[in-house]
Amino acid sequence: MGRIALVTGGTRGIGGGISRALKEAGYSVAANYHSGIEMAREFCDRTGIPVFSWDVSNYESCRKGTVAVSEALGGTVDILVNNAGITLDGMLHKMLPEDWIKVITTNLNSVFNMCRAVVNPMREKKFGRIINLSSVNGLKGQVGQTNYSAAKAGIVGFTKSLALESASKNITVNAIAPGYISTDMTEAIPADVREKICSGIPVGRFGRVDEIAQAVLFLADDRSSFMTGTVLSVNGGQYL
């Protein structure tokens, strides 16, 4: 296939599943990470996917990191999956300014940083696939997540605008809005809370990582070139 894919936050959870699925589909994959070096090394050893460490919230780090990926994999990035993100939940009347800033910087500013690093080479070769991970809570909001929901909603507006700017260059820009997905993070939710969440999901369960990865494969495919500026909701029927 010859396409180079870069996944931010790509060594664990949803990002790890996306990285593995892209490799299995024949892409040359690079996985970014920022913390958890031992876990990243184990992921690399287990999957054969090269890993690269940089802070996606830092513009210059993203530029340098993307250059390192291109040098290692022998070409510029064709598919960018902006998956990296954090949560620092809390009610707004108690939220610390630094918790607001850190979530917005990590979850939203990072999308600008990474897209800015890859979009010019994509425009030059007239091909690109940019896939941004938003969230169901970016579409509907969530108590205790004004920072997270604002960042994920911002990704939707960013996606639609960049899609319009890039369409004539054969670059598609789409977002995926996952619902609740079974990961280490959601497994840490108390059992009674998980049961309450599941009761509000029409299919009656949390989603699987591979179901998000499958959506990424669909949007990354050459045959999805007529789909851009969309938000693909993968949420088990929530909030339709």
Image (cartoon, grey):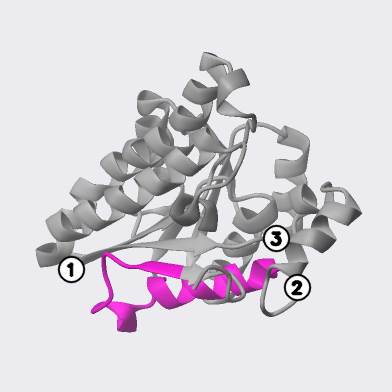
Q: Say left or right for 93 vs 164.
A: right
Secondary structure beneath dot 1 equals loop
* Residue at left offset 13%, top offset 55%: 165
Question: Comparing marks 1 and 3, which lies closer to the viewer?
Answer: 1
In front: label 3 or label 2: 2
Task: Answer with mark 1 or mark 3, whichever residue precedes in sequence.
Answer: 3
Lower position in the chain sequence, tag 2 or tag 1: 1
Q: Which residue is mark 2?
A: 205
Q: Is residue 154 left or right of residue 163?
A: right
Distance of mark 3 from mark 2, alpha carbons?
28 Å
Residue occupying the point 51% across, 15% down:
97
Callout 3–callout 2 Cβ contact below 8 Å: no
Residue on which the image places disc 3: 47
Look at the image and say whether residue 209 sits in the magenta stretch: yes
The residues colored magenta run 205-232
Q: Secondary structure at mark 2?
A: loop
Q: Type of residue at label 1? A: Asn
Question: Which residue is most to the bottom?
Answer: 223
| Res. 103 in view | yes
Estimate the x, y position of residue 60 in percent, counting from the top left: 36, 25
Residue name at image x 38 percent, y 53 percent: 74
Residue 82's mark? none
Point out residue 151 in the picture as x, y percentages from the top left corner. Answer: 44, 40
Q: Which residue is mark 1?
A: 170
Toward which corner of the image does residue 195 lie, by quadrant? bottom right
Mark 1 Cα shell of 10 Å, populated few (<14), some (14-19), many (≥20): some
In the displayed image of the protein, which residue is found farthest to the right? 191
Relative image position of residue 89 (x, y in whole percent): 64, 33
The picture places residue 79, in percent across and down from the top left corner, at 38, 60
Amino acid marked by disc 2: Arg
User: How far apart, in angstroms, are the residues tagged by discs 1 and 3?
Assistant: 31 Å
